[in-house]
Image (tube, rainbow, N blue to C red):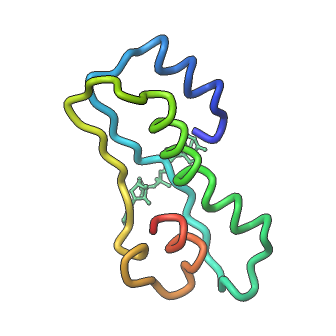
Amino acid sequence: MTDREAVAALLAAHPPAAVVHTAGALGLGSIAEDSVATLGEIAAAKVLGARHLDELLGDTPLDAFVLFSSIAGLWGSGGQGAYAAANA
Ligand SMILES: NC(=O)c1ccc[n+]([C@@H]2O[C@H](COP(=O)([O-])OP(=O)(O)OC[C@H]3O[C@@H](n4cnc5c(N)ncnc54)[C@H](OP(=O)(O)O)[C@@H]3O)[C@@H](O)[C@H]2O)c1
């Protein structure tokens, strides 16, 4: 999901009637102590996945376009700062 060309190839090989994006990486740690690289790694599957699907599908008619998230993205979760931000 972080590789735009790979997502494009997947969609070309399997044109979807609906999309449910559930890819994600759970990272445990304090956001104050995580490096920028760690924040990027944890956010990548969620955020780039959503972006790539949105850009590549454009106005393609779909029965559903679902981005799966965690409640951590709404009100946080202890030790899951980067994960919460990625889900938000
Ligand atoms: N489990 C929970 O309690 C819970 C609660 C709230 C929300 N969620 C959400 O539900 C979804 C699934 O959770 P889960 O517990 O089933 O998690 P999981 O077991 O860790 O599965 C995550 C999946 O995402 C895939 N993935 C990670 N990075 C990827 C990438 N860059 N490209 C493509 N696939 C990638 C993983 O593939 P690999 O195995 O190949 O790495 C794995 O199949 C996630 O979006 C999570 O945030 C889970």
In the depicted structure, whether residue 44 falls above or below residue 84: above
Residue furthest top as drawn: 13
Q: Position of residue 71 (x, y in %)?
A: 35, 73
Residue under the point 61% across and 60% down: 43
**Quarter location, residue 20:** top left
Count of labels in the image: 0
In the rendered view, does 47 fall on the left or right side of 32? Answer: left
Quadrant containing the N terminus in the rendered view:
top right
- State the residue in front, 88 or 79: 88
| Residue 33 location, quadrant | bottom right
Q: Is residue 31 above or below residue 1?
A: below
**Which sits in the foreground, 79 or 2?**
2
Residue 63 horizontal/vertical position (percent)? 20, 30
Q: Residue furthest left?
A: 63
Q: Please give the name of the residue rendered at 41% of the width and 47% of the height, measured from the top-left corner.
A: 22
The location of residue 17, given as percent across then percent down, is 26, 22
Q: In the image, is 17 to the left or to the right of 51? A: left
Where the C terminus falls, by quadrant?
bottom left
Residue appearing at x 46%, y 65% in the figure: 87
